[in-house]
Image (cartoon, helix red, strand yellow):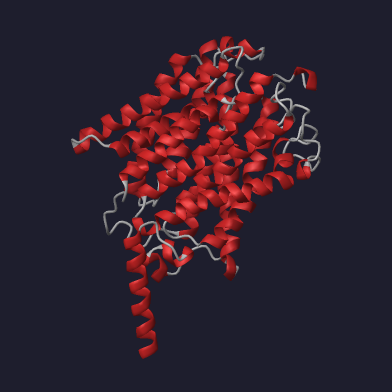
Amino acid sequence: MATSVNDIDMGATVWMIASSALVFLMIPGLGYFYGGMVRSKNALSLVFLCFMALAVVTLQWVIFGYSLALSETATNPFIGNFKHWLFLDVEYTPHPNAPKVPGVVYALYQCMFAALTPGLAIGGAAERIRVLPTIFYIFVWTTLVYDPIAYWVWAPNGWLFKMGVLDFAGGCAVETASGFAALAFYFVLGKRKGFGEEKWEPHNYLNIILGCSFLYFGWFGFNAGAASLESGRAGIAFMTTSLAAAAGGMTWVGLAYRVEHKFSSFHFCSGAVAGMVCVTPAASYVSTWASLPMGIIAGVCCYYMIEANLRLGIDDCIDVLAVHGIGGILGVFLTGVFADKKIMALDGIESAGGLINGNGRQLYVQLAALAASAAWSFVISYILLKAMNYIPIFRLRVDPDAEEHGVDFAELGEAGYKFMHDIARTHLSKHNTQDSLS
């Protein structure tokens, strides 16, 4: 594989820069998507934390994160080195994973992936988490969880990479890791106050649709950005993403209609996201038709996972485990089923393909990657969150009064809507008056 500056291609470079911008759009999209799903008194804090994830991870990525996650010179199978700290020698020389674009462009593209992932994970703690500890958590979690898993899967000397795992755009490092980190949040923080006693519904369906639109649009860059233009694999990734989203959305709407006898924009958005999550690791490894069953399977399994969570009393607040965790697991496994060696050979990748090509061994490799990614993310996240709770300044959960009246005003001193701001100020004024009288 060429890694000479003489092989840099202008078209591929422009496409990856554009794709980086598309993935960036997913970050505010995630904030609006999450913000619409929660109660209005907690919406702004989620949008804010998604942007903070972008800022914190960008700093971490430049200082040492990129080198830990994707160093091409590290020789051990588990983690990178510090050769590229502060982006030293990350300018024009291409990375082996992207031999036709300058190294700094590939690093930028991967930075957007790294910034999005902790934003997904903290959705599991929505409506009850403090801002300062979350900022600290994002930095440490990216270093201890995201960077190692990304190295295992994508770095030239990562142990899963050498085993032959097929994960094109983040089924392990992004989706599975964030889903099981969200599960760790549940076990450490517990349920929201009133969960199971009150029926909560999304407060703003328009924001959900707006956020889903940004996610939908950005996902084309997320899945197709690293695929080759001249071989057609970028077009394949674009189409598989679109088809899986359509199949997942329609499946979810149909399942919900059987119960509610109403069509729901929220259900379509959830299903579309589930479909795109599932196809992410397979995007340019499979034929277009394969994304149809992948989207349908994701729609069915993720829908019923939410039902299971409710029956089990698991407060998966924004369905991070159900959609991203389970969707990521399905996607990585089904990549082992549907990966087509003819599609991969378009770029000269030598692979035996998946089960459809008679390569049943690939399923064992995919399962090993899933087990390692899920276990590492959950265990390290759980230990990190438990340790943080022993340090008062990093105590994660807001106090009961702040949770009752909203994280937005308690942590930010602001609210997403003026009427919520006025209500919070009135309550604070009454609370202070009562304190002074007592």
Quadrant that contains the N terminus: top right
> Quick one: which residue is furthest to the bottom in this view?
438
Foreground: 124 or 355? 124
Quadrant that contains the C terminus: bottom left
Q: Residue at x 60, y 14 (%)?
A: 344
Quarter residue 132 falls in: bottom right
Q: Which percent across, then down, holds residue 182?
A: 49, 48
Q: Would residue 167 be found to the left or right of residue 274 on screen?
A: right
Q: Would residue 179 be found to the left or right of residue 297 on screen?
A: right
Relative vertical location of residue 183 with respect to residue 162 in this rendering, above or below? below
Question: Is residue 165 among what the camera can see?
Answer: no
Foreground: 115 or 166? 115
Q: Residue at x 78, y 44 (%)?
A: 85
Question: Is residue 310 among what the camera can see?
Answer: yes
Q: Which percent across, then down, holds residue 281?
A: 54, 27
Q: Which percent across, then down, holds residue 215?
A: 45, 36
Q: Residue at x 75, y 35 (%)?
A: 71
> Quick one: which residue is furthest to the left in this view?
261
Quarter residue 18 falls in: top right
Quarter residue 3 falls in: top right
Relative vertical location of residue 181 with respect to residue 372 in this rendering, above or below? below
Q: Which percent across, then down, holds residue 292?
A: 40, 20
How many numbered circles are shown?
0
Q: Residue at x 47, y 38 (%)?
A: 324
